[in-house]
Image: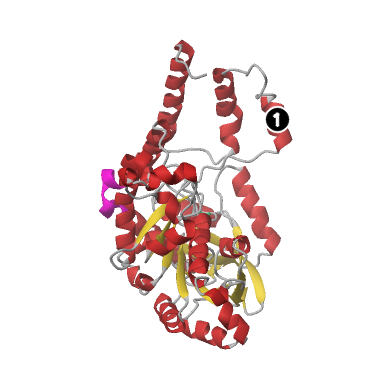
């Protein structure tokens, strides 16, 4: 298994050929999922005592399995938050895999971690956080949010009187589902401000005023969103940071999706106040064109994260030794063994320069504005709200929720587009609407027009 022979060399060439084909392709199909039973019927038993052979297995992948996935980088995939990794980043993902780097400790992964940190410096510079702020790459926004919440909670528990209390955080219903999920993991209570619109400092202050004395004692953090996943809404980060300072609360900004827009001059002002956050989540695998998976958590004071996350064990002592000294990514988030998942981003940034990142993000913003105008000019559809960041919510006049679902499936089945419905809260009612999220700079106006036309 670990020896080289002619078969292995041939397989290496086959795999490289496939990768080159995928990296250089300008078009790929929107694949469709199949049921497990259908896939099983197509490929049969593959994991057996003697194995089926690499060539056979790879052919199964190419013929039956690859196209049961929806490529997130398809220009007419506007569902959820799609992605669009640069070709340079994808190539370096291959290099990252081939290099077998343990990315937890400097002692083992200095070269890779150095590159990650160069990329991280750029991301931190976009936030405007003060000197000393720094971050690490995580598996995604969920892990970043968890790492930040745990850091905040441990900081709060340094006060002995909080040691046995269950903490409480405040966020709004616009926050991403992972905030609620990670609050559960960290066993903290969560209070949701019941509005999907921009959460303001005033809303926050009013909510704090409704707390019981015990709740107020347990409140330790506020999660603001820097670009809601559903609608691209950026909370009043300045106002919220101000209240957090006044009330001595940890201010976390979840900018997993929106963080890429910090690079865009046209909307940077909307994030004012983010420089006062205690921690920030940004997903390079969303709007910084990295391959999956690559999230990031950034701390104003990384030392607090280290106190919460640094793992202790006699087998780990060597890493803390003077001779091994350097930056240890494991100390700042929940994971020990880790891939140097920021390495593809570093290579892409080094290859293209940050200006190209700015331009690519601006294009996503521009596409949302263009789509907004096309919707306004089209009598069949109307905007639910003005496009925000790269999200556009709109309704097809006269449609029931089931029409949206049917339309989504039809377009997907045809291999034409993936655009999924969402819900928007209006007063007390949730309305089913259609949603675009633009990430891929290769999406064209014609793509948008064709998608709108398909609603006729
Ligand atoms: C996508 C997203 C997350 C979750 O990130 P993953 O990388 O999917 O774990 C968290 N918060 C926001 C605002 C998001 O858009």
Label 1 lies in ligand 1 vicinity (Cβ under 8 Å): no
Let me know if residue 147 is in the magenta part.
Answer: no
* Residue 380, quarter of the rendered image: bottom right
**How crowded is the residue under tag 1: few (<14 C-alpha within 10 Å), some, or many (20+)?**
few
Q: Is residue 344 above or below residue 370?
A: above
* Residue 359, quarter of the rendered image: bottom left
The dominant secondary structure in magenta is: helix
> Magenta span covers which residues?
348-357
Question: Badge 1 is on which residue?
Answer: 40
Q: Is residue 323 above or below residue 241?
A: above
Element under label 1?
helix
Residue beneath the point at 52% across and 42% down:
71
Image check: 130 left or right of 199?
left
Q: How many numbered discs, if any?
A: 1
Closer to the camera, 283 or 420?
A: 283
Colour convention of the picture: secondary structure
Residue 166 at what x, y percent from top left?
62, 71
Closer to the camera, 96 or 167?
A: 167
Q: Is residue 438 above or below residue 252?
A: above
Closer to the camera, 12 or 26?
A: 12
Image check: 63 left or right of 8?
right
* Residue 100, quarter of the rendered image: top left
Residue 326 at what x, y percent from top left?
32, 48
Residue 321 at what x, y percent from top left?
36, 46
Residue beneath the point at 37% across and 73% down:
276
Q: Is residue 86 visible?
A: no
Residue 104 at what x, y percent from top left?
43, 45
Residue beneath the point at 54% across and 87% down:
206
Find the residue positioned furthest to the top: 6
Q: Is residue 176 visible?
A: yes
Which corner quadrant holds the C terminus? Answer: bottom right
């Amino acid at each position: 298994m670990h020896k080289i022979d002619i078969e292995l060399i041939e397989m290496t060439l086959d795999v490289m050929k496939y990768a080159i084909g995928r990296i250089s392709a300008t078009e790929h199909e929107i694949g469709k999922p199949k049921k497990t039973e259908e896939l099983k019927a197509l490929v049969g038993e593959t994991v057996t005592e003697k194995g089926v052979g690499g060539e056979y297995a790879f052919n199964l992948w190419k013929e039956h399995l690859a196209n049961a996935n929806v490529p997130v980088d398809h220009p007419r995939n506007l569902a959820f938050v799609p992605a669009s990794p640069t070709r340079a980043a994808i190539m370096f993902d291959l290099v990252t895999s081939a290099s077998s780097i343990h990315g937890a400790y400097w002692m083992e992964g200095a070269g890779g971690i150095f590159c990650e940190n160069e990329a991280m410096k750029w991301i931190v510079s976009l936030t405007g956080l003060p000197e000393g702020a720094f971050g690490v790459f995580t598996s995604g926004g969920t892990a970043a949010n968890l790492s930040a919440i745990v850091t905040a909670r441990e900081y709060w528990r340094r006060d002995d009187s909080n040691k046995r209390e269950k903490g409480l955080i405040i966020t709004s219903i616009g926050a991403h589902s992972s905030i609620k999920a990670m609050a559960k993991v960290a066993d903290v209570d969560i209070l949701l401000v019941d509005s999907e619109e921009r959460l303001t400092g005033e809303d926050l202050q009013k909510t704090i005023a409704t707390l019981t004395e015990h709740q107020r004692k347990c409140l330790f953090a506020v999660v603001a969103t820097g670009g809601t996943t559903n609608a691209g809404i950026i909370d009043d980060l300045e106002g919220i940071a101000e209240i957090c300072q006044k009330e001595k609360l940890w201010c976390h900004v979840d900018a997993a999706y929106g963080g890429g827009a910090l690079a865009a001059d046209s909307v940077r002002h909307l994030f004012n106040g983010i420089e006062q956050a205690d921690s920030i989540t940004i997903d390079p695998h969303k709007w910084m064109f990295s391959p999956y998976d690559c999230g990031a958590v950034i701390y104003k004071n990384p030392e607090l994260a280290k106190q919460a996350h640094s793992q202790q064990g006699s087998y780990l002592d060597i890493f803390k030794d003077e001779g091994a000294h350097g930056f240890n990514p494991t100390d700042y988030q929940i994971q020990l063994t880790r891939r140097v998942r920021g390495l593809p981003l570093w290579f892409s940034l080094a290859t293209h320069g940050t200006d190209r990142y700015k331009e690519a993000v601006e294009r996503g913003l521009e596409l949302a504005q263009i789509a907004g105008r096309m919707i306004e000019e089209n009598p069949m559809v109307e905007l639910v709200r003005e496009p925000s960041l790269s999200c556009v919510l709109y309704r097809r006049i006269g449609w029931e929720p089931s029409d949206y679902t049917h339309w989504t499936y039809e377009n997907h089945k045809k291999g034409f587009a993936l655009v999924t419905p969402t819900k928007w809260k209006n007063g007390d009612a949730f309305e089913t609407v259609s949603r675009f999220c633009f990430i891929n700079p290769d999406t064209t106006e014609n793509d948008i027009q064709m998608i709108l036309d398909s609603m006729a």
